[in-house]
Image (cartoon, rainbow, N blue to C red):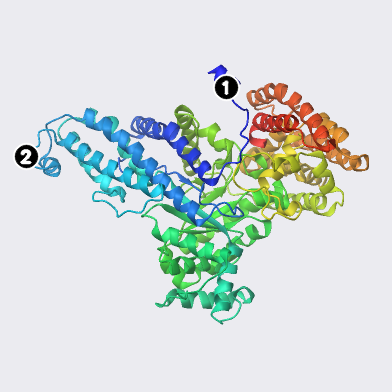
Amino acid sequence: MVAQSWHTDEIRKIRPTPIDEAKWGFAVVENSLWEGVPAFLREFNEQLEESIDYNLPVEASPIRFTSWMGGDRDGNPNVTAEITRHALLLSRWKAADLFLNDIQVLVSELSMTESTPELRELAGGADVAEPYREIAKQLRTRLQVTRDYLEQRIKGQQSLPPEGLLIDNSALWEPLYACYQSLHQCGMRIIANGQLLDTLRRIRCFGLQLVRLDIRQESTNHTEALSELTQYLELGDYASWSEEQKQTFLLTELNSKRPLIPTHWQPSEATKEVFETCRVIAESPKDSIASYVISMAKVPSDVLAVKLLLKEAGADIRLPVAPLFETLEDLNNAESVMTRLFDIPWYRDLIDNKQMVMIGYSDSAKDAGVMAASWAQYRAQDALIKLCEKSGVTLTLFHGRGGTIGRGGAPAHAALLSQPPGSLKGGLRVTEQGEMIRFKFGLPQVTISSLAHYAGAILEANLLPPPEPKTAWIEVMDALSDVSCEMYRGYVRGEKDFVPYFRAATPEGELGKLPLGSRPAKRRPTGGVETLRAIPWIFAWTQNRLMLPAWLGAGAALQHEIDNGKQAVLDDMCENWPFFNTRIAMLEMVYAKADLWLAEYYDQRLVEENLWPLGAKLRQQLSDDIKSVLAISKDEHLMADLPWVAESIALRNVYTDPLNVLQAELLQRSRTHSESDPRIEQALMVTIAGIAAGMRNTG
């Protein structure tokens, strides 16, 4: 194993395609989740029995997995309708293959002869000697047929659906559940609760879809597609209409029985892609698509537009459509947008009093800084919870957290308990992205531990909800948000030397060469920092150990409130409010991983002297901020209440610090050489990957 690792490239040299990413996701299911989820549910059920004498129903599905590998086309031109179609086929093929393995085990195990009359009839009649095995064999045949058919489709071969093709989960569930009930009734509970129970729980968790797919697209793409259509129909320019005009048009067409799209219309490629994506959704078997997420959603018509596009494609318009509120302004307007949407009678009738809303963490932090963003996220969630309670709507909050602190990342338990009261009543829907999937779900035992953390936090948050914030706390947070946002934007948007400094002091330009994923580093190929995605924005600052997006503005705002006589209020918040306490803890973790000497070393090696004062100013701000946070936490040094985490960081720094020094040297050589040196490029990529691994949830 050591020799194999030593002789394997440290990093991939070819950028993965969206299908490569989807296959990697399926491998996580196969190698970890397939075993880990039933094992966790078994442990969870045992604890429920011991604690409250309650058995988890077999048909319960407390855990579901969804993916947008192959479905997220927001700013990623590599994800097309055809890619989504292919990813869905691959997902179903892998599910059929995994269930076929399960059923083969059941064919070997279920040799019992005693059964209920109902099961014997299901197996083929009184003459069947081994009814359980016979049912398992029938399912094995159908799964083989299903897998072979899907394999042909994946290869591009067109054929009619064969007899026995499994499409709906009920066709797999009902025969096996009948076996389970019969075994219980015939006194063979120990057999029923073995491999058969695990398979039943996999059907509920994964199903014949394996993982459901989320579709995501930016709202402007829908607007531009409808604008092109209305202009072709000589109805005017949809994009230029007022919000009221858009809603009137959309609702009229949604209630119309005639098609809107002309048969022989030839739209542009971009518009064609929008409509084709909706056709893929329409073609997909039931429960294959979990939701349609609209990034940069700003107004009710953004949601209605997607409903119309789905209708015209022949898809089920009851598919959950989730607006994603992600900038500071959008988060502040979220309640208003949803209020106006709920006030539309047609929409309220359609959603059956169920609504999903996605909260964006990455872009809001990049837009306004981590302190202002976290407060806007909290207030938006709190307002939406209260709005939905008043409106009689069951709300599902979808948390678009990344692994990094600058993208909303935090230890699961602390993150969930720091949310507004009532935010977890409808359960939890949260993203796990990139390296965090491997860290949290890479092995079955790790999966069990991660799911236990989530389950424990959700139960605690519902049984012992955090307090409603006091008026004084809200006033202080409003001030912290304003001051921190002003400082953050003052540097990022107002400082004329900031962008040149950022590009010189970090490997931002070199990150584009690192084949981390299929998505481009920028939403648009041209443009400055504003077009840069949140991931490379935070990733770049992590590499030079300044960690700027995860702290800029926060410490200064805290000091501002201390100077204004709010120390006692801040102490009260830190002691009694999980939301604020978690913010302070995350700042301490970031500060512990930052390194002023290394950040200065990057400046000396890579930055022109005329930009050095800006770097010195930022490092001084970081040093001052650490003192401000320690004054609130009442600790002598960072992370005093989490010594094991501090020790872990210190241990990793022993290995990452030399990588930083080496990276600065390699960056200097790479930038001064007129011709590219493959050895330098390879070594540089290795340092980037190594530092990111060492920084964990800030990298």
Q: Quadrant of residue 240?
A: bottom right
Quadrant location of the C terminus?
top right
Q: Residues within 10 Å of mark 2 (few under 14, many from 20)?
A: few
- Disc 2 marks a residue whose amino acid type is Ala
Judged by depth in the image, the label closer to the viewer, 1 or 2, is: 1
- Mark 1 = which residue? 5
Q: Residues within 10 Å of mark 1 (few under 14, many from 20)?
A: few
- Disc 1 marks a residue whose amino acid type is Ser
Q: Quadrant of residue 581?
A: top right
Closest to the observer: 23 or 489?
23
Q: Is residue 193 visible?
A: no
Query: Would you say 135 lies left or right of 627 here?
Result: left
- Mark 2 = which residue? 126
Closest to the observer: 666 or 487?
666
Query: Would you say 468 lies left or right of 451 here?
Result: right
Task: Give the residue furthest to the left.
Answer: 127
Image x and y of residue 160, in percent: 30, 55
